[in-house]
Image (cartoon, rainbow, N blue to C red):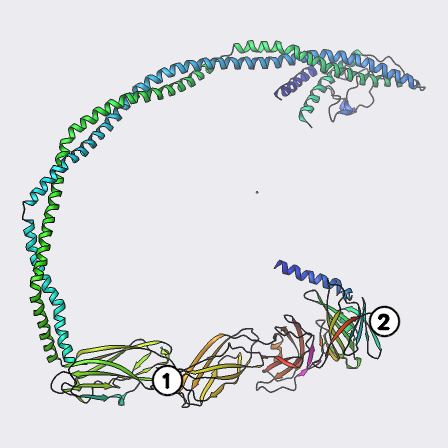
């Protein structure tokens, strides 16, 4: 590629040089001044004086120089076709001759030059590279040698030195470590022995014994205090409590109780070739003559000449050029090579030398360093280690000896102390405990005796009693608490100094006013049971919750005792839906409930059930029901009739059901707030038009109807529309356009349709309701209401 | 969502391609008779014929749901596309004397036969056709919205029209 480019560049240079030679000859003032204009030549372009024409260059075809002599005008009678062919042939032969000559001459010359240039370049480059490589190699070898030498020397020096330093340092550390370990091993035995021996000579055991005796005595005393004293008190208390009650009185205080994401190469060759051919044609043109005077024959001759010239030129040029190149190339190569010998390649020598030096140095240095390092390291290590060992051993030995001795001493002393301590402590405890035990028991009895004497009034128990004794604590029920107190004095004590409280948790229990004392005296060695003292009322917020209360009893301001009680608050009865409630829009549906008596007492009849809701999406047609008396555990069912008033599929409805017994006392309640399915087979929705009903005139009521679940095939649908006033009465003045009832095309299950019901509203009706009843095969399936 | 949209478009194209041009689907063409009442119908591509028990016949042209003709009280088979590739066939013979027009609404009574046809039935000829038939059916047309309601009362009948070979 580079060679082609070179040829092209060379061609361009030669072309330019030839142009400079040929241009004066081509100028109109010289060469063409006495020639007639040639056919086919562009006037404008042919007048260019400064450049020879280029026959075959692309885009310049019309201006291609014609190598033929210009024709001379002839008589009108033309030659025969044979004569013309002969003229063309003769022209072609002459052209080929001339072209071949010209091509050969130019091809050889140019080829020779090209070959020389190429050869020069090749030779030059080759030889120069060879020289440079050779010089580089020599430099490299020289560098290697020098570098190796220097590296080795330096590596030896530095390796040895560094080895020594490191060896010394490591040796010292090693010696220190050996000295310390050896000293420790050597010292441990004798030091420990000495330590134990010295410890044995102390009074550690005796000191332990003394301390143990003290501790044993203290433990015996404390143990007796913790166990025997309470036992003594308990024994006395039990004795007293087990004494029979001489007399027990009861007092009920409830009476007062109250309540929360073209071949360029070919083009270049052609271009270069044509540049040369163009010049050659001009030259041939000057030397060739057209032998014919007849215009046609001249033209044929010229045509043949032109064709032959080009053919001859091309063939000869290429061949000779190639030959010239081959002939010139060796010469050029030799010359180039010679020239290369004079190039300064000292830098390559230096480069090789430097690189060789670096490599030689590095490799030699490394190996020499390692060897020298080892040589320096070993002796230094050993020497330093030994020296350090010698220096440090004695000191380490002394330190280790002292440490081991102390440790052994301390351990032995401790061992002796603990042995003495444990034995003495245990022995002392065993010896002294019985005495302490008896003394503490007696003290407990004595103290309890005194306590009873000082506080003869004792809390015994407490409890509660329902207002309605049915084993169910209900909201609203009053619970009365009681407690029992004994008097352990011989004489009667006044109950007026008794005080009692009921503490309640949360807001579920509401204590009524407390009555602090009874009026009766507590008999000597007797007891009193006080009931109804502090009544509490169970609030509604406590329903279905656990609540607790604590009864505390005081005597003369001192707490005698307390007791907590927890109970579950619930109604006597429960009421719930028998099945999930569902409603139908516009149509009645039944809500079934079941009421169960959970108490131990009958619930008197008639038991009345009532359902309430403040939602406008449901109309309660029958909101109450009654069942007979409910025996304990018995259940009965009742039902309510309701009508849905919503176009929602599953509205949220609040419902409350209460149950009262025959005395109108509520015994059960259920609050329900949840989604209630609307189960009509068809659902209707008023899309628009409702607001216009307030105005008189025509109103289009646009509805949508959907078959939700009817499986009937082609069920006949009828629409009955009504306008109701605010009191629910049909407004007869409202007139329906078309039909009423209106029939509607059947809908299959899941389908929906829209329809319009036109109505003419009367004047003066500003509020009311429009009702649309849908019947399928005559049966109402949904009644939709919309207020206006 | 896209699938649903395509489905709806397909139904619409199918509906307009068949029902909208007022042609009875070929699977439904032929003679049918209700054994209980003797009421017969003949269905052709663009017309239908009622044949009563006494042999009286009446021919009805099949139309796309052209409210214009319906407003004029013209008898005919009105075809209307609905969802799921079905055609509503609203076959009506108006009682001219009952025709009323007020407030943009036109209403009349008449004999009605209502049935449904699948716009395309892969199973071939349909053997049985169910239809709701009444003598006193209704049609209510909203000339503003160009829509209509219509139907039969509760006492109307459901015909079980069984395909029969035509008499030679």
Front-most of residues B18 and A25: B18
User: Which label is found at residue B72?
Assistant: none
Q: Position of residue A723 (x, y in %)?
A: 62, 83
Chain ID, mark 1:
A
Q: Position of residue A432 (x, y in %)?
A: 7, 63
State yes or no: residue A737 in magenta: yes
Q: Residue at x 15, y 31 (%)?
A: A393
Span shown in magenta: A730-752
Per the image, the residue denoted by label 2 is: B167
Chain ID, mark 2:
B
Q: Position of residue B61 (x, y in %)?
A: 81, 70
Looking at the figure, which quarter contains the N terminus of chain A? top right
Front-most of residues A169 and A228: A228
User: Which label is found at residue A600?
Assistant: 1
Q: Is residue A430 above or below residue A484?
A: above
The quarter of the picture where residue A544 lies is: bottom left
Main SS category, magenta section: loop
Left or right relative to A623: residue B103: right
Left or right relative to A617: residue A82: right
Q: Say if labels 1 and 2 share a chain.
A: no
Assign a secondary structure to mark 1: loop
């Amino acid at each position: 590629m580079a060679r082609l480019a070179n040829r092209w560049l060379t061609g361009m240079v030669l072309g330019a040089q030839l142009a400079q030679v040929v241009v004066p000859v081509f100028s109109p003032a010289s060469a063409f001044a006495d020639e007639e204009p040639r056919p086919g030549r562009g006037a404008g372009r042919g007048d260019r004086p400064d450049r020879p024409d280029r026959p075959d260059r692309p885009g310049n075809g019309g201006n291609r120089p014609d190598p033929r002599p210009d024709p001379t005008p002839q008589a009108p009678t033309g030659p025969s076709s044979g004569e013309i062919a002969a003229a063309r042939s003769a022209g072609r032969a002459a052209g080929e001759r001339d072209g071949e000559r010209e091509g050969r001459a130019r091809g050889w010359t140019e080829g020779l030059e090209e070959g020389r240039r190429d050869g020069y370049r090749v030779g030059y480059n080759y030889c120069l590279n060879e020289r440079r490589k050779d010089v580089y190699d020599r430099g490299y070898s020289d560098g290697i040698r020098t570098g190796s030498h220097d590296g080795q020397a330096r590596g030896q020096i530095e390796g040895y030195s560094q080895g020594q330093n490191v060896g010394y340092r490591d040796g010292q550390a090693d010696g220190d470590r050996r000295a310390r370990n050896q000293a420790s091993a050597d010292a441990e035995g004798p030091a420990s022995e000495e330590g134990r021996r010295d410890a044995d000579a102390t009074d550690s055991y005796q000191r332990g014994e003394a301390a143990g005796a003290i501790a044993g005595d203290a433990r015996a005393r404390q143990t007796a205090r913790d166990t025997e004293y309470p036992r003594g008190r308990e024994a006395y208390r039990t004795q007293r409590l087990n004494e029979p009650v001489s007399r027990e009185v009861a007092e009920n205080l409830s009476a007062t109780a109250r309540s929360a994401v073209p071949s360029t190469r070919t083009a270049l060759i052609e271009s270069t070739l044509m540049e040369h051919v163009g010049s050659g044609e001009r030259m041939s043109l000057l030397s060739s003559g057209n032998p014919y005077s007849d215009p046609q024959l001249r033209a044929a001759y010229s045509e043949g000449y032109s064709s032959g010239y080009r053919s001859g030129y091309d063939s000869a040029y290429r061949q000779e050029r190639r030959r010239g190149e081959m002939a010139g190339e060796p010469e050029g190569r030799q010359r180039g090579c010679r020239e290369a010998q004079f190039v300064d390649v000292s830098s390559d020598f230096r480069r090789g030398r430097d690189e060789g030096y670096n490599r030689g140095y590095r490799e030699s240095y490394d190996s020499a360093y390692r060897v020298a390092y080892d040589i320096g390291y070993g002796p230094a290590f050993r020497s330093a280690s030994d020296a350090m060992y010698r220096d440090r051993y004695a000191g380490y030995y002394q330190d280790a000896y002292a440490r081991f001795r102390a440790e052994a001493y301390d351990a032995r002393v401790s061992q002796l102390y603990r042995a003495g301590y444990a034995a003495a402590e245990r022995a002392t405890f065993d010896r002294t405990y019985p005495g302490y035990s008896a003394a503490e028991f007696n003290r407990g009895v004595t103290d309890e005796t005194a306590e009873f004497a000082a506080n003869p009034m004792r809390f015994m128990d407490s409890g509660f009693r329902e207002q309605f004794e049915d084993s169910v604590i209900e909201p609203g029920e009053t619970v009365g608490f009681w407690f029992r107190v004994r008097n352990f004095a011989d004489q009667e004590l006044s109950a007026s100094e008794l005080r009692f409280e009921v503490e309640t948790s949360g807001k579920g229990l509401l204590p009524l006013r407390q009555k602090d004392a009874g009026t009766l005296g507590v008999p000597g060695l007797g007891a009193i049971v006080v009931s109804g003292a502090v009544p509490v009322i169970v609030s509604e917020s406590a329903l279905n919750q656990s609540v607790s209360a604590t009864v505390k009893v005081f005597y003369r301001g001192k707490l005698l005792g307390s007791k907590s009680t927890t109970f579950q608050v619930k109604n006597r009865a429960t009421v719930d839906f028998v099945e999930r409630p569902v409603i139908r829009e516009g149509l009645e549906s039944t809500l079934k409930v079941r009421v169960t008596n959970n108490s131990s007492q009958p619930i008197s009849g008639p038991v009345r059930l009532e359902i309430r809701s403040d939602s406008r999406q449901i109309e309660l047609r029958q909101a109450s029901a009654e069942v007979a008396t409910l025996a304990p555990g018995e259940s009965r069912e009742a039902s309510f009739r309701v009508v849905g008033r919503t176009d929602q599929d599953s509205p949220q409805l609040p419902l409350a059901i209460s149950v009262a017994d025959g005395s109108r006392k509520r015994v059960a309640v259920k609050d329900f707030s949840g989604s209630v399915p609307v189960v009509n087979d068809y659902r209707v929705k008023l899309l628009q038009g409702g607001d216009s009903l307030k105005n008189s005139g025509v109103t289009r009521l646009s509805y949508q109807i959907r078959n939700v679940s009817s499986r009937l095939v082609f069920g006949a649908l009828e629409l009955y529309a009504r306008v109701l006033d605010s009191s629910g009465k049909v407004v007869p003045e409202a007139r329906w356009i078309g039909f009423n009832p209106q029939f509607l095309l059947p809908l299959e299950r899941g389908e929906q349709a829209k329809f319009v019901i036109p109505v003419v509203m009367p004047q003066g009706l500003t509020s009311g309701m429009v009702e649309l009843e849908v019947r399928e095969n005559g049966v109402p399936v949904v009644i939709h209401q919309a207020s206006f | 969502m896209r699938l649903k949209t395509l489905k709806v478009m397909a139904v619409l194209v199918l509906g307009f391609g068949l029902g909208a041009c007022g042609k009875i689907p070929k699977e439904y063409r032929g003679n049918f008779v209700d054994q209980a009442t003797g009421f017969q119908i003949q269905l052709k591509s663009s017309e239908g014929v009622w044949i009563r028990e006494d042999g009286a016949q009446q021919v009805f042209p099949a139309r796309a749901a052209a409210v214009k003709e319906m407003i004029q009280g013209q008898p005919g088979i009105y075809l209307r596309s609905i969802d799921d590739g079905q055609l509503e066939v609203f076959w009506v013979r108006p009682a001219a004397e009952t025709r009323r027009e007020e407030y943009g609404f036109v209403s009349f009574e008449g004999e009605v036969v209502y049935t449904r046809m699948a716009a395309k039935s892969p199973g071939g000829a349909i053997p049985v056709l169910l239809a709701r038939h009444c003598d006193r059916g209704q049609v209510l047309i909203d000339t503003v919205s160009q829509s209509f309601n219509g139907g039969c009362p509760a006492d109307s009948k459901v015909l079980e029209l069984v395909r029969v070979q035509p008499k030679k």
